[in-house]
Image (cartoon, helix red, strand yellow):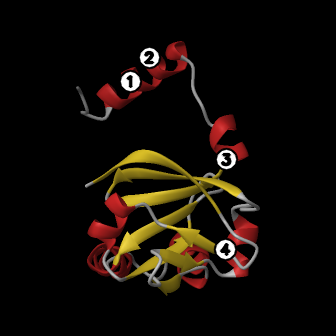
Amino acid sequence: MFMGEYNHTVDPKGRLIVPSKFREQLGAEFVVTKGLDGCLFVYSADEWHDVEEKFRSIPGTSKDARKFARFFFAGAAAVELDKQGRILLPPVLREYADLQKDVVLVGVLNRVEIWSKDRWLENSYDEDEMDEIAEHMADMGFSI
C-alpha cells in the first residue's frame, strides 16, 4: 500500500527521483499514465496488469469506456529506475500534468500520484469540505 507525501523536483531533462519508500513497492520497472484531476498515476507492474484486466471486462460497446481507455492507455509509458533512483517522464506526460520543476508524489493505496506542486496546493481541502465528503463516503459504505 502506498501512502505519504514527498516533495521533489523534475530536472531539465525530465528526470524525477522516486522516493525510496515508493521504489521498494514499485520495483525496477513500472507504468506512469495520465491520471484524473490533472496528475499522473503510477502503478507497479502487477497493479497495472490488474488495471488492464478490469478494462478488458468492460464492454467495448460503451462509448465512455472506449474514450476513457484511449485517454488512459495512450498516455501510458513503461519506465524504469536508473542507478540514482530516477525515472524519465515522457514530455507528453509532463505537459499533461504541468510538471515544470517542483512536484509532489503522493501515495494513494494502490498507486502513486505525481502532481505539480501548484496543482497539489490548489487541491487542498478545508475541514468543513472534508466533513461533507466523509458523509458522502459513508453513503457508499465507507467509514473510519
Residue 1 disc label: none
Nearer to us in this view, 67 or 78: 78
First along the sequence among labels 3 and 1: 3
Q: Neighbour class for label 2 at 10 Å: few (<14), some, many (≥20)?
A: few
Q: Where is residue 141? Give x, y as percent.
A: 24, 33
The type of residue carrying mark 4 is: Leu
Tag nearer the camera, 3 or 2: 3
Tell me how far mark 4 sits from mark 3, CA to CA. 15 Å
User: Are the residues tagged 1 and 2 within 8 Å (C-beta)?
Assistant: yes
Q: Which residue is mark 2?
A: 131
> Upstream in the sequence, badge 4 or badge 3?
4
Q: Residues within 10 Å of mark 3 (few under 14, many from 20)?
A: many
* Numbered tag placed on residue 93 in the rendering: 4
Name the one closer to the observer, 33 or 62. 33
Query: Disc 3 or disc 1, which is closer to the eye?
Result: 3
Q: Residues within 10 Å of mark 4 (few under 14, many from 20)?
A: many
Tell me the kind of residue under disc 1.
Answer: Ala
* Rendered residue at 45%/79% (across/down): 31
Say what secondary structure mark 1 lies in. Answer: helix
The answer for how far apart the CA atoms under marks 2 and 4 are is 33 Å
Instruction: Quickly name the residue at label 1.
Output: 134
Say how many tags the image has: 4
Q: Secondary structure at mark 3?
A: helix
Quadrant of res 89: bottom right
- Disc 3/disc 1 C-alpha distance (Å): 25 Å
Residue 15 falls left or right of residue 142? right
Whether residue 68 is visible, yes or no, is: no
Pointers 1 and 4 in contact (CB under 8 A)? no
For disc 3, the marked residue is: 117
Give whichever of 29, 38 is nearer the camera. 29
